[in-house]
Amino acid sequence: MESGSRSMHRLTAIIIWPILFLFLSHAAHCFYLPGVAPEDFQKGDPLKVKVNKLTSIKTQLPYSYYSLPFCPPEKIVDSAENLGEVLRGDRIENSPYVFKMREPHMCTILCRITLDAKTAKQFKEKIDDEYRVNMILDNLPLVVPIRRLDQDSSTVYQLGYHVGLKGQYSGSKEEKYFIHNHLAFTVRYHRDPQTDSARIVGFEVKPYSIKHEYEGKWNEKSRLTTCDPHNKRTVVNSNTPQEVEAKKEIIFTYDVEYQESDVKWASRWDAYLLMNDDQIHWFSIVNSLMIVLFLSGMVAMIMLRTLYRDISRYNELETQEEAQEETGWKLVHGDVFRPPSNSDLLCVYVGTGVQFLGMVLVTMIFAVFGFLSPSNRGGLMTAMLLLWVFMGIFAGYASARLYKMFKGAEWKKLAFRTACMFPGIVFAIFFVLNAIIWGQKSSGAVPFGTMFALVLMWFGISVPLVFVGGYVGFKKPAIEDPVKTNKIPRQIPEQAWYMNPTFSILIGGILPFGAVFIELFFILTSIWLNQFYYIFGFLFLVFIILLITCAEITIVLCYFQLCSEDYQWWWRSYLTSGSSALYLFLYATFYFFTKLEITKLVSGLLYFGYMLIASYAFFVLTGTIGFYACFWFTRLIYSSVKID
């Protein structure tokens, strides 16, 4: 056994450490630690304003900025994007906006276009669906400050500005479309008095719709009468808005204002991350955790006292007659470790759950320490994909160890199923959803090259690692059962209605779901309502509570099951805590109909498709936690009693 353990550690070191070294060295350049890599600008230095995707919470379909006829630069250049950014639909490109540090511009003309029927229709569709334009300056996203009327001097920030708006002229009932063609930018900076250099700490905009006018015929030297820097005339309202209609002329303009700020560079993200009223958030999480901890304490106390009494009573039995009269979980000792039906499939799901658990734990640790802050767009998703691939070795090891305990012999076949089953199902759903997005010509569609890279990571790294883990796990000595298994299965007596497998499984999923559903609301809001989520410390705490709750509720129900002389606990332990995924999907459905304004069929399919993937992953994760808790529990109690 010692030689097998040494070989396991040696193989793990050979494979994992070089990969981790490469990953961490890459992270040193790519990951953003708040307060580490500022950029200093002197007065007059050019600032690169980049445009990102157009987003809408009504359609959930991102589009590239230049899919609309906005003013383009001389040459459109794509910025390098990581894997996570591509999967998120980010398309970062250069823009024609010219900013120079601490040099204000007033009413700079960007370009003039004349709409035809096609472009007018495109703008109207995007305004109808409430699309927002996203921009980036020095890695800060563009926000629109909005004063809240219910609180004094309270400002919230909306990510991106709307392409336009719908409205009516006074005295008219006809609804018109208006475009935001004048942008008043505000760049906030923190100045170093010693070097006179400055760091950007804020990027805000106020969009206006203004029908620009000028004298004579249009040429490059034309001056606007509605917005003229020479006469100090600026746009301060949208009283004469710019309509979106075919054959209408639109002139795009912008102002740039620079404001010194006391906010230091290390704290510049605070305003973005505290966009919501978080008092309800904190109160709800603490309340949820207190309830779950209280229930967990009660469960643990009952279990410990009851088990201690049972074990003491069983061990005090002196005669065979007394043993035969006894009922309860000791009676099924000869069948409790009998391999279940479809044991191969159980091994596959347990191995996949271990892989998922490892990925989630390491990702959370990275996030808690600030490696995956929102400023590193796509970093979270990239890290999760890489960690999933690398955790394949633990998936193979866990499934092979369990498989050998069930007297299995074809470990290669099992390793292949472990490596391909869960990712294959997820990839199939993702491929269908991606085809739907591609049909909508959205930038959210994953390009063929990225798809190929994902498949290459899967079969080039993950599958071999699963096989390595499977080989090492199968070579180790089989786990020995604490009691012998009878050759003839014991008949299971008729069960009470409340011990019906379906009923007990559904009941078992309620408590784990209750541990996370408050946090789930904020996670869904950040994903589907285009908001930041960065309270990873509390998320990690909730995750630990989820682990404890899944383990305890599954142990309790497993104990009741064994006391009813039903020894078929293997699959039920997995499904008991795994059923919380059903409640997660039902809650996602409730959230869809109560919080979102999605009306299009395609967007609805995307939502439910992605939530199905999330629920399936949650099922695998929680099911594995419940299974291992019961596995440990049954081995503990049956090794604690004297079996004649």
Image (tube, rainbow, N blue to C red):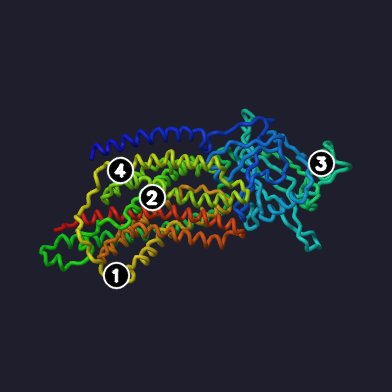
* Placement of 68 over or under 196, stated as above or below: below
The residue tagged with tag 2: helix, strand or loop? Answer: helix
Compare residues 447 and 21 and report the one nearer the observer: 447
Number of the label disc, if any, that sits on residue 473? 4
Q: CA distance from mark 3 to mark 1?
A: 85 Å
Q: CA distance from mark 4 to mark 1?
A: 37 Å
* Quadrant (top left/top right/bottom left/bottom right) for the C terminus: bottom left
Q: Which residue, given by chain and number where applicable, does mark 3 sit on?
A: 228
Q: Which residue, given by chain and number where applicable, does mark 2 sit on?
A: 353
Q: CA distance from mark 4 to mark 3?
A: 75 Å
> Where residue 165 sits: x, y (%)?
71, 54
Compare residues 128 and 437 and report the one nearer the observer: 437
Disc number lying in front (4 or 3): 4
> Where residue 406 sits: x, y (%)?
27, 51
* Quadrant (top left/top right/bottom left/bottom right) for the N terminus: top left
Q: CA distance from mark 2 to mark 3?
A: 64 Å
Farthest residue to the top: give it: 195
Compare residues 45 and 360 and report the one nearer the observer: 360
- The amino acid at mark 3 is Asp
The residue tagged with tag 3: helix, strand or loop? Answer: loop
- The amino acid at mark 4 is Gly
Quadrant housing residue 182 = top right
- The amino acid at mark 2 is Gly
Disc number lying in front (3 or 1): 1
